[in-house]
Amino acid sequence: MEDKVIFLSPSAQEYNVGYGDFGTEEYRMNRIADIVERMLKEDGYTVYRNNPNEKLSAAVKKSNEIGPDIHVALHSNASGEGFSAQGPEIFANRPGTSGDKLANSIYEEIMQIYPDQTKGRGVLYTSSLYEIIRTNAPAVLLEVAFHDNPEDANWIINNEEPIAQAIVNGINNYFKQF
């Protein structure tokens, strides 16, 4: 996709430690973002990234200054509910928007590779997630799966490349709609 600009914003939450060998949310989501970035560049996109050492407000400011076509935040979830919560979910601002279309495109691709289709948590809408509501570009925040659930944490660890490919496929499918 020539002339398309993407802003990737992997988690900077170095205090969120996942189950077992997961490491931190910041570490794992930046590993996946590295793969996503490489794949997007191979597809002809221009890609910018947040700086994980800066505050979230700096990432949003940078994205707004660049003016990308889309803004994609990558996170892993934690429930604090023991091991019961599972599955991917993705946030957009509201239904019927470009962000909603992007969220659905990425979610559909992630669910194709997630091992338990009944655990998907869907596309959710928010008026409070800073990165979604303060970013000028259509923005989504993907919670890949729960890093405090052993099954989800191990799935993420063992599927970084397929997860990245699913995200890229979702982005490509989004741009094909226009």
Image (tube, grey):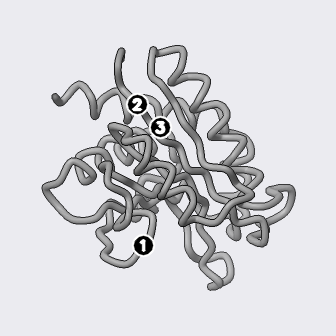
Q: Report the quarter where the C terminus lies.
A: top left
Looking at the image, residue 9 lies above or below residue 6: below
Type of amino acid at the residue the image marks with label 3: Ile
Work out how far the residue at label 3 is from the one at label 2, CA to CA, in angstroms.
15 Å
Label 1: state its secondary structure: loop
Residue shown at the point (21%, 47%) measured from the top left: 98
Q: Which mark is residue 5?
A: 2
Residue shown at the point (24%, 53%) measured from the top left: 100
Q: Position of residue 43 (x, y in %)?
A: 46, 15
Q: Which residue is mark 1?
A: 129
Label 2: state its secondary structure: strand
- The quadrant in which residue 42 appears is top right
Q: Residues within 10 Å of mark 1 (few under 14, many from 20)?
A: some
Q: Which mark is residue 167?
A: 3
- The quadrant in which residue 121 appears is bottom left
Q: Residues within 10 Å of mark 3 (few under 14, many from 20)?
A: many
**Residue at the right extreme of this rendering:** 21
Left or right, 89 with reference to 148: left
Left or right, 128 with reference to 165: left
Work out how far the residue at label 1 is from the one at label 2, CA to CA, in angstroms.
22 Å
